[in-house]
Image (spheres, rainbow, N blue to C red):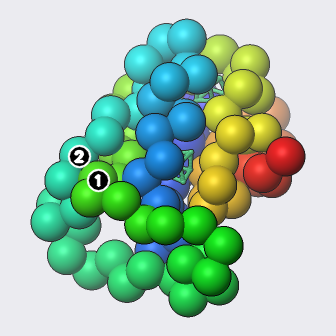
Amino acid sequence: MVTVEVQHNKCTGCQHCRDVCPVTVFEMQPREKFPDAVDDPAVAAKFQFRVEKSAVIAGPDCIMCEACLAECEGECITIVDDEGKVHQSTYK
Ligand code: SF4
Ligand code: SF4
């Protein structure tokens, strides 16, 4: 089973993952839903943190298209595929 994770400390709420995912793995939710998240200063130096963060609502539906991995401002999406290989987002 594929697993998808978002590190909320680094998630800027840019919505790119939600917009590009063909199978609705992500949903934007108010940042108040992530009370433990502390905005990462290194990411904040480059991008603005918005009022929402991305929640993974359907990780097992991921078809490994890798679209989100190239679009994530916070470089904070990690996907582990069926074979246990780890894929980390890198913003292009
Ligand atoms: S790699 Fe998975 S989570 Fe990312 S956009 Fe594609 S289907 Fe969605
Ligand atoms: S693309 Fe990355 S930084 Fe942007 S909302 Fe999704 S998880 Fe957060």
State the image coordinates of residue 52 (x, y, percent, origin top left).
29, 53
Quarter of the rendered structure image containing ligand 1: top right
Say what amino acid the circle numbered 2 marks.
Gln
The N terminus: image quadrant? top right
Mark 1 CB near ligand 2 (8 Å cut): yes
Q: Which residue is mark 2?
A: 29
Compare residues 20 and 66 and report the one nearer the observer.
20
Q: Where is residue 36, by image quadrant?
A: bottom left
Q: Position of residue 69 (x, y in %)?
A: 73, 40
Secondary structure state at the residue bearing disc 1: strand
- Dot 2 and dot 1 residues touching (CB under 8 Å): yes
Q: Kindly identify which numbered label has been placed on residue 65.
A: none
**In this rendering, would 62 be left or right of 50?**
right
Amino acid identity at mark 1: Glu
Q: Residue at x 42, y 52 (%)?
A: 13
53 over 28 or under it: above or below: below
Is 5 rendered above or below residue 3? below
Q: Residue 47, position in %: x, y?
A: 58, 67
Comparing 30 with 45, the one in front is 45
The location of residue 90, given as percent across then percent down, is 80, 53
Name the side, left or right, on which 45 lies relative to 23: right
Residue neighbourhood size for the residue with mark 2, other residues' Cα within 10 Å, grouped as few (<14), some (14–19), many (≥20): some
Q: Residue furthest left?
A: 32
Q: Is residue 59 visible from the viewing direction of this image?
A: no
Q: Residue beneath label 1, please?
A: 52
Calculate the distance from the C-alpha at mark 2 to the C-alpha at mark 1. Answer: 5 Å
**Residue 66 in view (yes/no):** yes
